[in-house]
Amino acid sequence: PDVSKISVPAAVGLGLGLLIGGGIVYDLMMMSPLGRNEKAFAVIAYLIIVAISYGLFRIFSGRAAYIHVGAMFGTIMAANVWMHILPAQKKMIAAIKEGRKPDDALSAQAKLRSKQNTFMAVPVVFLMISNHFPGVSYGDHYSWAILSVLVLLGWIAAKLIRRA
């Protein structure tokens, strides 16, 4: 498909906006009641990912769109670790050292974000591998749909891995 003729600064701004905005939207969803309903969260998150994929393919090349979705997932995963999982772990360790019971809510939230990182990791691997197979990934007119299916297959694979 044709790529829009946006300027380099606009493309950079859009890419950075996706990384930051994607993380903010994810965090807001996690803090909302939706964050406590895994199935509803997954459906809404998937629909957002499909919309982002479609939009990116209207603006960037297929390869760039795949890279941006992978970078968004990677940024969310890193933020989960550094801003939620590790701080919760430090607070729980401090509570134990002080003889207090660790906060169950911290533990549950860290566990959920860790689980979601597992579900994002498999699609990220698919997206990295896709760079070597443009004919069956980003080199097609329906690349956004292929990317959406890869994400869904990644989630299914992660679910199977977590059961093993």
Image (spheres, grey):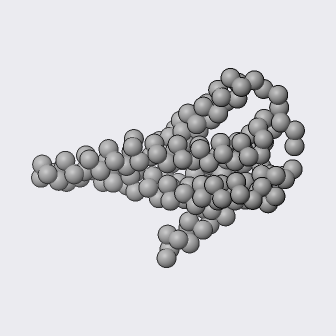
Q: Between 114 and 123, which is closer to the camera in this rendering? A: 123
Vertical placement of 60 versus 155: above or below?
Answer: above
Residue at far front of view: 132
Vertical position of residue 27 compared to residue 158: above or below:
above
Q: How many marks?
A: 0
In this rendered view, identify the residue nearer to me: 110 or 118: 118
Residue occupying the point 54% across, 57% down:
121
Q: Could you tell me which residue is drawn at 75 percent across and 59 percent down?
A: 133
Q: Can you see residue 67?
A: yes
In the displayed structure, 122 sits above or below 69; it is below
Q: Quadrant of residue 147?
A: bottom right
Q: Is residue 24 left or right of residue 109?
A: right
Judge left or right: residue 17 versus residue 7.
left
Q: Residue at x 49, y 69 (%)?
A: 162
Residue 159 placement: quadrant: bottom right
Q: Position of residue 43 (x, y in %)?
A: 64, 54
Residue 95 at x, y = what percent?
19, 49
Determine the residue positioned at 62% across, 62% down: 154
Q: Is residue 18 left or right of residue 104?
A: right
Where in the figure is residue 47, as x and y percent of width and height? 69, 49
